[in-house]
Image (cartoon, rainbow, N blue to C red):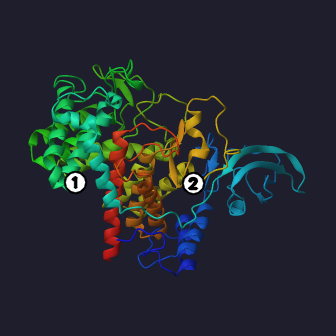
Amino acid sequence: MPYRRNASPFKTGLAPRFLALILAFHSGVATAVEWADVRLDNRDLNAAAQADYRIPVRPGIPGKTPYWNRHSRRFLYAPAFDFPAVAAAAKYRFRASTGQTFTGEQPYDPLTTIWADIPVGPVELVVEALDEDGNVLSVAGTRRFYRAAPFTTPYRDAVVGYRECALKGLRFLLTEPHVQHWKSSSEPDPNYSLYCYPSKVIGALVQAMALYGKLAPEHRDDALAIAKNAADYLMRYSQPADAVLAHWPPTYSGEKHAARGQNHLVMWQEPSNVAEGYLDLFDATGERVYFEAAVRIASTYERSQAEDGSWPLKADLATGKTVSEQRCIPTYVTVFLDRLVAQYGETRFAPCRDAALGWMLQNPVRTYNWTGQFEDVGVNVDAYTNLQRGDAATLAIILLSKSSRTDATLKTALELIRFCEDQFVVWDKPNPDNWGRPAKGAPQDWARDLRTWSPPCVLEQYKYYVPVDASAASMILAYAKAYEATGEQLYLAKATALANMMTIWQDMQSGYLPTRWLVGRGDINWLNCATYDIQALLTLDSVLSKTTER
């Protein structure tokens, strides 16, 4: 199968039609488009990307649509800013320090008309209120930001096929000492400090080993033995049947990293990760104890759901009392519940799933406050100060996967993907002198050293604005699903550019998939991130196989 940057399906032709379809789709003129016969070469792909970048992502409107970008410092898509109207102003002049100007009706007009002409780099924007004669009344607002580099193919070729890369990654995980430890022990290896996040990391281990047992028959016995011991450990340390959060596994354990002092707390999305591992293990072994464990976790989600379809983000594991004002963005919970309904016929969980999805459509989809919800980052942060792409990308995948997908949900999903790309996908290395790095000595400043970046890559969250492998995996999955839903070749090109980079970062001898994509820097091996990489690579390999067959 070809993975080369110039290979089929990126064939020549139909660029003008493709650009027209993009503009029509985003303007709302066309809501259902047949893309299957569109094939593009590199120049057409780049032109299509540039045309798309002129369309703003969820621009704010005073009193109607919140401004999500008040703390954003870089943009791929033409932004619009929260500048107040000036009394007696007839129009507004927008002046970029790079020389571009235009006149608009409102101070919050997007920069669409000049966006393609603004070069990559820092921009100082000044918006002036004008009277009827064009005289300056006052400055409505100013904003400094970085105009990010657009998608510009060709990118680097894959080193190996995606499936081979995934299998190498699984083999590496199997042979890791802290994974082999599970073959003879019912407790985690204390030498691997990240087991302090049992639901996230050990839950991912169960998923990875169940998957490897399926894909590599020669390693099936070892992989499943490890998966079962790890799963049994999680069940053994879960809450008892009569607890408020019955059968839920712990989010934290021990005193390593952020687990210190938090062993009594649970983050609401984490048990769903463990439950997914139980289902994978049930599929691999047929042992119903794991299926029943997953259903018990779902039952607790069902019992604890609020009337509006939401759950808290963080609570006391024993009492269920919330310790955070934030609500959980339940993308992973929704995926888990949908799996129970769709794959196993557990339709009793459909109302719970639908209510969770409805809450997301009414809340973060309206506000775009995609606040980071990580177990090792503080909660209760101010709105928009720590945006991240994971939940937005996963919700896009959910909406694109629905059998009852509508034109409206398709448009919502694609805009979510555009938001993720706008704020977190880096297609070319930024200039380290003017990208707006944190002050010298700030936490993790060394990790934000742009000289260590090797794009294309994807950043994790504002509070850790660093290239991370799992962030790339989330975008590979989102782009692949968008391609499947629309047939738009640009999505496939973006997915393969990131996946190719994942094969480049992999250590070919060991199969190790590094967590941080930072040249010359040390790494900490997050097992769950590698598992997500592997799932993304296998998914894209499957999508490309279907594309080749057409």
Q: Amino acid at mark 1?
A: Ala
Judge the density around disc 2: few (<14), some (14-19), many (≥20) Cα neighbours within 10 Å: many
Residue depicted at 51% across the width and 52% down the height: 457
> Mark on residue 76?
none
Q: Is residue 490 visible?
A: yes
Residue 195 vs 509, above or below: the answer is above
Could you say whether the residue bearing mark 1 is in a helix, strand or loop?
helix
Locate residue 393, reporting x and y percent: 43, 50
Determine whether, in the image, residue 255 is placed left or right of residue 213: right
| Picture residue at 45% right of the left edge, 72% below the top | 33
- Of residue 239 and residue 83, the one placed in the foreground of this image is 239
Amino acid on which the number 2 mark rests in the picture: Val
For label 2, the residue is 57
The residue at 70%/52% (across/down) is 121
Looking at the picture, tell me which residue is in the foreground, 234 or 321: 234
**Left or right, residue 232 beside residue 475:** left
Which residue has dot 1 on it? 342
Which one is nearer the viewer's eye here, 492 or 400? 492
Going from the N terminus, do you reach mark 1 or mark 2 first?
A: 2
Q: Is residue 406 above or below residue 7?
A: above
Measure the alpha-carbon separation of dots 1 and 2: 32 Å
Does dot 2 land on a helix, a strand or a loop? loop
The 10 Å Cα crowd at callout 1, few under 14, some 14 to 19, many 20 or more, is few
Can the viewer see residue 305 in this picture?
A: no
Residue shown at 67%/60% (left/top)?
A: 112
Q: Position of residue 546 (x, y in %)?
A: 31, 70
Quadrant occupied by the C terminus = bottom left
The percent position of residue 22, horizontal first and vertical second, equals: 54, 69
Residue 451 percent coordinates (x, y): 61, 46
